[in-house]
Image (tube, rainbow, N blue to C red):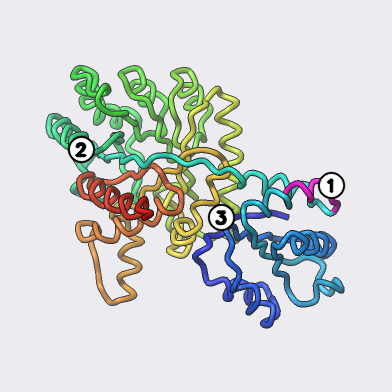
Amino acid sequence: MRVYRLNCDIDLKRVMLKIGVDKPGIEIMKKKKCEFIFYIKDITCGAANILKQDALSIGAELAVPRGVPDCTNKIFDAILLCNKKQLEILSKKELAQPFKLKELAKSLREFINLPTFPTKIMGVINANDDSFFEGSRFKGNDAILKIEEMIENGAKMIDIGGVSSRPGSEYVGREEELRRVKPIIDEIYKSRLYEKAIFSIDTFDEVVLEYALDRGFKIANDITGLERDEYAKVAGKYGASVVIMHKKGDPKDMQNNPFYENVILEIDEFFSERVKKAKNFGIKDIILDVGIGFGKRLEDNIALIKHLGHFLHFGYELLIGASRKSMIDMIMQKENVKTTPADRLPGTLAIHLESIRNGASIIRCHDVKEHFQAIKVYEAIKEFDV
């Protein structure tokens, strides 16, 4: 039995029909307002009957398929609807119940007091010739000038990368990667720019990582999600913050028919394992990145953005990086409109603002000035409560 949180702004009727809930029950439940919607996968009949009675006793609801009361179905999916107070009560009640409800209770408790973080912009600088967006490629002094501009325009973080991880790309090797980023890192250190912003190195190589961390960088942005022990050792040694990103496959082949039984649960399991590994290596400051476009179908990317708030239960900041990515083109092609990376700023802003609404606090983007304005307007509207 596993559980994940759904965005409350969903078509609840459609979801309940999908799991087989009776139509009369759907009409009653869909009218209820709730703070939390949880999708419970593979719950047993015994557990569902107990959980439903406990939920009803406190004013919450458990939507179950037809045939549950008499156990026609042995294992199925269910949907729990509740507010925060009901969640607190229910997560305590189920600790004393059988049928693995104790484990469910522990999972539910993680959602009671979710953290909030201020929104920060992370500007992107690519020190290579093959990054998918030409406008992000900079070398030497041009890179430094762009970094200074990004900081002036509102970036609190700057992410420097020397290799492309776009679909179809191949790793150029450690020596070439270091050759590309070394001049920029050296100038950042020499000019003490690390005092004006937090610098991140976008690498999965521990030698490149150590070179950057030894010169004022504070964040290790790892698209492999701490796959290599040597990398984790270096990050732990320097007390670096680590971005644990999820991807399926390698950049060379990751978009060759990726498939998920349940993308939310699969990434949740991945994060659980890698967070544990990070802690074992002494890494305390963790940032999670669901990896938009890294071995994901369009529907996977949309689901992750829609239900991003689920991953807040880990207690860490969520980074989102969908800047000018191909999912925007996939959406627009349904409208018979073809786009290039240069055309995708409006779609990028839409994705990133929705991600902030759903829990993201670090926005990795190419267009700092435009994002700063959009975020400030969004925040002003959200905070207005007269």
- Cα distance in 3D space between marks 2 and 3: 33 Å
Q: Nearer the viewer, residue 157 or 177?
A: 157
Label 1 environment density (alpha carbons within 10 Å; few <14, some 14–19, many ≥20): few
- Residue identifier under label 3: 264
- Cα distance in 3D space between marks 3 and 1: 28 Å
Q: Quadrant of residue 295?
A: bottom left
Residue 279 in the figure: left or right of residue 323: right
- Residue identifier under label 1: 96
Q: Kindly identify the residue that appears in the image at 60 percent across and 41 percent down.
A: 272
- The amino acid type, in three-letter code, at marker 2 is Met
Q: Kindly identify the residue that appears in the image at 51 percent across and 67 percent down.
A: 10
Q: Is residue 217 above or below residue 288?
A: above
Checking the image for residue 150, the label placed there is 2
In terms of secondary structure, where does tag 1 sit?
helix
Q: Is residue 64 above or below residue 366?
A: below
Q: Nearer the viewer, residue 95 or 333?
A: 95
**Which label's residue is closer to the chain start, 3 or 1?**
1
The stretch of residues the image draws in magenta is 91-98
**Which label's residue is closer to the chain start, 1 or 2?**
1
- The amino acid type, in three-letter code, at marker 1 is Ala
